[in-house]
Amino acid sequence: VQLQASGGGLVQAGGSLRLPCKFSGIAFRNYAMGWFRQAPRKEREFVSVITWSGANTYYADSVKGRFTISRDNAENTVYLQMNSLKPEDTAVYYCAAHKGSLSSIYVADQELYAYWGPGTLVTVSS
């Protein structure tokens, strides 16, 4: 499995970006797909996850109502739509994959995600 996130860049506060993450491998639909981020001088943190079926999505409180995760199983791609961006959203964004089901109480546990992409930088200016 290989993951490649893209779509990062420089955006003004209040703006929007859409991050796609392309999954290369077998049986994308068997994986829960997550987004994490790491801001400068901070630890990597959970942002959002979508279950293998797309039926369930979960978000960090800091992005709830502003970010939307979705997936296209025909295109082997997961998306993170980010609206109303804030300077504190500045970070490297990583997509990650977990094979199988994922209980809601564990969605933020990074150790459960076996596959990670190299990340894409999002910079939000004030």
Image: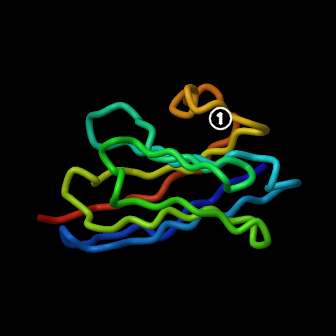
Q: Secondary structure at mark 1?
A: loop
Q: Estimate the x, y position of residue 96 in percent, counting from the top left.
A: 61, 45
* Quarter assignment of residue 76: bottom right
How packed mark 1 is, by other alpha carbons closer than 10 Å (few <14, some 14-19, many 20 or more), is: some
Quadrant in which the C terminus appears: bottom left
Q: Estimate the x, y position of residue 80 in percent, counting from the top left.
A: 49, 62
User: In the rendered view, does 121 fall on the left or right side of 34?
Assistant: left
Residue denoted by label 1: 113
Residue at the limit of the structure toward the front, as seen here: 55
Could you tell me which residue is drawn at 67 percent across and 47 percent down? 51
Residue at the limit of the structure toward the left, as seen here: 126
Could you tell me which residue is drawn at 39 percent across and 58 percent down? 121
Image height of 114 relative to 20, above or below: above
Could you tell me which residue is drawn at 33 percent across and 73 percent down? 16
User: In the rendered view, does 99 fall on the left or right side of 90?
Assistant: right
User: In the rendered view, does 99 fall on the left or right side of 80?
Assistant: right
Indicate the amino acid at tag 1.
Tyr
